Image: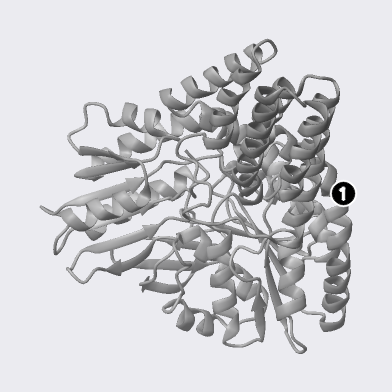
Amino acid sequence: MGVLLAQVPVLSASAFAGHGVRAVAVMACALATVLAGVRWLRVAQREHYLADATSRFALRWWGSSPLNAAAVAAAGIALVASGKWPAAAMVTAVVAGGGPVGLSLRGRTSALAWTRRMKTLAALWLVLQGAILAAGILLGLGPAVSAAGALAVPALVDLACVITTPFERRAAGTYVARAQARLEKVAPTVVAVTGSYGKTSTKGYVAHLVAGSKTVVASPASFNNRAGLARAVNEHLAEGTEVFVAEMGTYAKGEIEQLCRWIRPDIAVITAVGPVHLERFGTEERIVEAKAEILHDARCAVLVVDDERLAALARRCADAGMAVRRVSAADPAADVCVLASPDGARVMVAGEELADAMAFDGRPTNVGCAIAVALELGVAPGEVVERLGTLPTAPHRLEVSETGGGAVVLDDTYNANPAGARVALETLAERAAGEVRRVVVTPGMVELGARQAEENERFARQAADVATDVVVVGRTNRRALLRGLAGAEARVVVVARRDQAVTWVRQHLGPGDAVLYENDLPDHYP
C-alpha cells in the first residue's frame, strides 16, 4: 500500500506547487484511503470475496448507529464542498479513514490474512484507487476526487473482486484437477451431504457410524466449497479409503452442480431446507432448487420427508428410478425414523425397531440421515446401534460443557438458523429446569433476507419464554431482538461485543445455572 502513498508527494509537488492546502488535502485523503482499504479488504476476505459483500457491509456499518450515520453524512457534505473549498476534503478523509466507529482496523476475531489471493486483490484495488487519484490530480480536481475515492473504497474493493474472480477460478482449477484425478484413482464411495443446516453434524455422524467397518475420510471442518473440497481430497484422501464424505455448501444456484461434476456422489443427502442464506437466494424455493443439484447423478437419495418440499423431491427421485431412503422424526413407517423422547430415542428402520431408549445428542433427522447412509453402505444394523451411543458432537453446535463454578454452558455459536435456535432453547430448558438462572446470549441470526427482522423478533420472544436473562450482543439485530423482548419478564442486557457478554455471564452465573450462546458473529458485523 506504500506504493499509493509514495506517489502522492511526487504528484502533488509537480501538479500543486504553491497550492499547499490542496496538496495536504490530497495526501490526507490518500492516507485515509489506505486505512479504509485495510478495513474493507478484511471484510471482503471474511465474506469469501463475494462481489457485492463489501458494499453491503459498508451500508450496514454506516447506518448502524446515529454516530456513524452523522459522520458519513458530514463526509458527504464535505465532499461536495471540497470542489470549492479544498480543505473540506480533510473532513471526508477523517471519516473515511477513521470510520465507521466499531469496525476494527486490525480485527478482534480474525485479522486480515495476507494470502496470495489477498495480495492479488489488494494490488488490483491499489491500481484502481491510484488511477482515480491520478486522474483527479491531472484534471485539477485532486481534493474532491481523492475524497470521493476514499469514500468509494468498499465499491472499488468489490470491483476488484469481480475482476479477479475469473482469474482465481482458473488458478484453483489446477488443484481441482488434481483432486479429481485422486478421486478417480482411489475410487471411494462418495457420500455428499448438503442442507440449509445440519450438514456438518450429519457428515460427522456418517463418518462415525461407518468408521467401525470401513475406511472413511470426511472433509474437515466446514471445507464445503470448491477450494476447500479440493484441498480436503488432495491432503486427506489416502490410498485404500473406501468412503469419502463430502459436505457441500452453496451461496448460489449452480455451485453444487459444479462440485458434483468432479466429486460424483453415489449417495446424496439433503438434511433440511430453511431460510439460511435467504439474503442471497431470495426465496426458499430457490434454495430447494440449489440443494437438489446434489441429487442429479447419485444412485441413492437420502431425504428428510418431514419437510413437504423434500418429500416432493423424494417422489420425483423415485419416479425417475433412483433409490430413495426417506428419513423422518415423526413417521415410524419411513425408511428410517428417529423418535425422540425424554427417555431416549427410538430408532425404527422400515417400520421395525432397531433400537429403543437410545441416549445420544443430536438432531433426530440428522442422526436418521446418518443411519440411512450407513445401512445403505452395508454397515451391519448391530454395528450402527453400537456406535450410536458414542456419536460425536460437532464443535460449537450445541456443545455442552460445565464451568469450574458448576454452571452449564451450551455452545451453539456456529448455529444461525431458526429451527436450530428453537432446538437450542428446548435443550436449555431441559438442562436447567427449576429455580435456576437460564441465560441466552445472542447477536441474533443473519442472512435471512427480508425475513431477518421477523425471525429475530420471533426468536427473542421464544427466548424470553425460556430464559431468565437475555443478553443482546451488537447492533446487527438489536432492534428486532428488543422488539421481541418488549414486555418480557426476562431481564434484558445489551452489550456491544461478545467478550462483554462473557464477562457478564461469569459475574452472574453460579452452580446449577445455565447459559446458551446462540450464534456468534465475527467482528466485521456491527
At label 1, the amino acid type is Pro
Judged from the image, the secondary structure of the residue bearing numbered disc 1 is: helix
User: Percent from the top left, x then y, of residue 207?
Assistant: 59, 76
- The crowd level at tag 1 (other Cα within 10 Å; few <14, some 14-19, many 20+) is few
Q: How is the image coloured?
A: one colour
Q: Please state which of residues 513 and 38 is positioned toward the viewer in this rendering.
A: 38
The image quadrant of residue 154 is top right
Q: Is residue 255 visible?
A: yes
Give the residue at x 85% y 55%. 169
Image: 523 above or below 363: above
Residue occupying the point 77% across, 88% down: 239
Quarter where residue 97 is shown: top right
Q: Is residue 180 left or right of residue 205?
A: right
Position of residue 469 in the picture relative to residue 167 (left or right): left
Report x, y in % for residue 68. 47, 27
User: Number of labelled discs?
Assistant: 1
The extreme left residue here reads: 435
Of residue 169 and residue 142, the one placed in the foreground of this image is: 142
- Relative to 463, say whether 428 is above or below: below
Q: Quadrant of residue 402?
A: bottom left
Name the residue beneath numbered marker 1. Answer: 166
Q: Is residue 1 visible?
A: no
Q: Position of residue 491 (x, y in %)?
A: 19, 38
Q: Residue at x 74, y 35 (%)?
A: 156
> x%, y% of residue 209?
55, 78
| Of 93 and 304, the residue lying toward us | 93
